[in-house]
Amino acid sequence: MKNLFLIAVFALVSHVTVSAQALTPIEELGKNIFFDRLSAGPPRQACASCHHPSAGWTGGIAGINIHGAVYPGAEPRAFGNRKPPSSAYATFSPNFYFDSDTGEFIGGNLWDGRATGWLRGSPTADQALGPFAADVEQNISLQKVCMKIQASKYAMLFEQVWGPGSLDCTDSGYLYTGDRIAWSIAAYEASAEVIPFSSRFDDYWRVCLNAGNDAEACGKAEGDKAVLDPDNLLTEQEFEGLVQFGEYCSACHVSHEPGPDGLPPVFSSHEFDNIGVPRNPENPVYEYDPGFVDLGLGGFLDTADEWAHLARLNDGKMKIPTVRNVAAGLGEGFTRSYMHNGVFKSLEQVVHFYNTRDVPEAGWPPPEVEANVNRELFEGVPLGDLQLPAEDEAAIVAFLATLTDRVAPGKPIGVIAPRAVPR
Ligand code: HEC
Ligand code: HEC
């Protein structure tokens, strides 16, 4: 079983080619690093092993997604215990901070916000070196990564971007080189190739604003379709889905406020919440820690002196992920997983969960963390008992599929689509 899996990871990444895009040199460098199988291995893994462009920059192996959803690191027994979130659109998250007005934490990267941005002024740059240090991910020390890059085909590009002598892997130099590696990866993750805003929703959004409507109306479909969508870019069902999304989802997955610099919405408020997701019984963590509970933000706050006293108020809260590209790669037998532990296997299931979590007859298992579950009112009904008919659930799912970025024709990011691979 394991062997099959190893082959799958290897096959997937080895077929990803680096294609010519209009990238700046530093972005191109970051891309080379992102797709390079730098881990000690076997299996030699790249960032793309767990953040595959064709799967919306999350795990690209269906055989893993349908079960534990946790991607094993290069050290075979050292599984992490969370599902890879999308690495795209993560660059929009601000540095982690506490908003004393609202009493809420905001920003950072990772499900618990612990890539804070305090080291390098960017959560994504802070996160970029994490996998090289963490056993559960790429299992290789930063100095060895540095030396692998020295020996790579893109070593010259590195010195072109950062200057002669910048690829210094000596004991006294590699940490500085590490920062350059981090910034290069972060630059690629912030490039127009990774965050193109090229979905059908984005077309609708731009046309809607250009037609003189305001962001709130466009992002929640508040008004006549003919006025908001004069070019008829969304189907009736997708538009109806946006109406529902605006009412029940946009408070967290913000669809009605422009992103930074007038970009379309990012679909996250960058806050944290406990929406009562059940545990994933197939999470490999239970094999060695049967009582494991993922406290999310609360667990991280326990390690931060100034905020440890707020930890229990934040147990079970996870970073609100963007829902951009949640439908990417679906179809033809490819399955994805959703939530921090990958317990859900389809968007239908996700939407049905929000609609019926607290309806006893629906039979959902209890939340992984009972504390702080959000039962806030939306349009007068509580999250978890939205009382939506089946057709509204289907409309929301249809809407989510409009959030898939389209890759420019003839310019694939990876040449093979993710496949269903038996485990
Ligand atoms: C073995 C699988 C694996 C590999 C390899 C991997 N990641 Fe991840 N990545 C994850 C998991 C799991 C998380 C979430 C971890 C957590 O929340 O504790 C994550 C989180 C992230 C995030 C945060 C996204 C967000 O919205 O918070 C970014 C960005 C990211 N990874 C980039 C990278 C980069 C860059 C590399 C290569 C240097 C990489 N990853 C390699 C599994 C992986
Ligand atoms: C109160 C805030 C909140 C609201 C409202 C909300 N979500 Fe979420 N959403 C979250 C959080 C937090 C997570 C991650 C939870 C976890 O992993 O435990 C999440 C996760 C998701 C995911 C999984 C994404 C991934 O990468 O795994 C999808 C899809 C999603 N939400 C869709 C929706 C839809 C559709 C609605 C409206 C019916 C909605 N959400 C309403 C906070 C919210």
Image: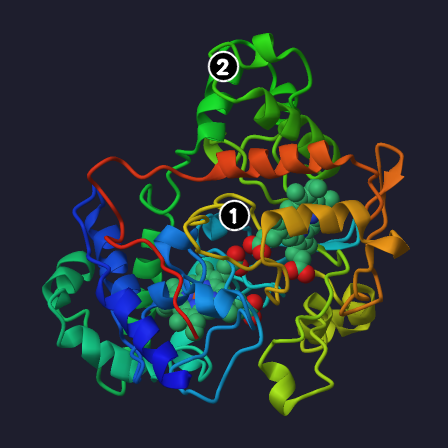
* Horizontal side of residue 384 vs 293, given as left or right: right
**Secondary structure of the residue carrying numbered label 2:** loop
In the rendered view, would you say 4 is above or below 381? below
Q: Residue at x 51, y 43 (%)?
A: 324
* Horizontal side of residue 307 vs 168, given as left or right: right
* Horizontal side of residue 149 vs 284, given as left or right: left
Task: Using the rendered image of the protein, determine whether residue 124 is visible from the camera's viewpoint.
Answer: yes
What amino acid is found at the position of numbered circle 2 in the picture?
Asn
- Badge 1 density bin: few <14, some 14–19, many ≥20, Cα 10 Å: many
Residue carrying label 1 = 326
**Secondary structure of the residue carrying numbered label 1:** loop
Residue 349 x %, y %: 66, 51
Residue carrying label 2 = 232
Residue 285 x %, y %: 60, 82
Q: Residue at x 27, y 55 (%)?
A: 416
Mark 2 vs 1, N-terminal side: 2
In which image quadrant can residue 287 be found?
bottom right
- Judge: label 1 CB < 8 Å from ligand 2: yes
Residue 338 x %, y %: 59, 57
In the rendered view, would you say 211 is above or below 98? above
Residue 160 x %, y %: 13, 58
Q: Quadrant of the C terminus?
A: bottom left
Marks 2/1: CA–CA distance = 23 Å
What amino acid is found at the position of numbered circle 1 in the picture?
Val
